[in-house]
Image (spheres, helix red, strand yellow):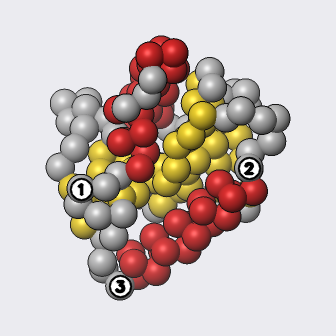
Amino acid sequence: MFIKSLIPTELNSTWKVVATCESQTECQVDDFLSSLPTNYEKDGVAIRRLFAYVALNGPRLLPPEICHTIATDIWQFRKGHIRVVWFYDEGKIVACCHAFVKKTQKTPLAVIRHATEALRDYRLQKARSNVTELPGG
């Protein structure tokens, strides 16, 4: 398993905001945010600014309309129509595992299932010392 920083490397932060990646070349969250259609670019910029804020201050002070839990141990960032699903890791790490454009009132069950599986896989791979940090940020 791989993780990749979602914040600029020059940002001297207390928290780490990372994306879980399928491989060294596939990172759904980063790829999604980097290839947004024009009508969602503004929301993409806002979510990246939110990542920088979280890196400096942590996610706990964010209001529920921007950050809230959607399942046990699974959280969601929200900016405009963009949603990024994430979970905590020890050592002040926010691990983002899925990003999408939300078109319905409730978070799709498939997204929650994917996030739950990503959390389970992350913990398993971490216990096996099998998580590699990729260059990014």
Q: What residue type is labelled 1?
A: Thr
Q: Residue under circle 2?
A: 108
Q: What residue type is labelled 2?
A: Pro
> Disc 2 versus disc 3: distance between alpha carbons?
31 Å
Q: Residue at x 49, y 74 (%)?
A: 121
Out of 119 and 114, give the one closest to the viewer. 114
Let me know if residue 121 appears in the view. yes
- Corner quadrant of residue 79: top right
Q: Residues within 10 Å of mark 2 (few under 14, many from 20)?
A: few
Q: Residue under circle 1?
A: 25
Confirm or deny contact between disc 2 and disc 3 (CB under 8 A).
no
Q: Residues within 10 Å of mark 3 (few under 14, many from 20)?
A: few
> Disc 1 versus disc 3: distance between alpha carbons?
22 Å
Q: Residue at x 51, y 15 (%)?
A: 39
Q: What element carries label 3?
A: loop
Residue 120 drawn above or below residue 35: below
Q: Which mark is residue 96?
A: none
From the viewer's perspective, is 12 left or right of 33? left
From the viewer's perspective, is 81 left or right of 18? right
Q: Residue under circle 3?
A: 128
Q: Residues within 10 Å of mark 1 (few under 14, many from 20)?
A: few
Q: Which amino acid does label 3 sit on?
A: Arg
Let me know if residue 53 appears in the view. no
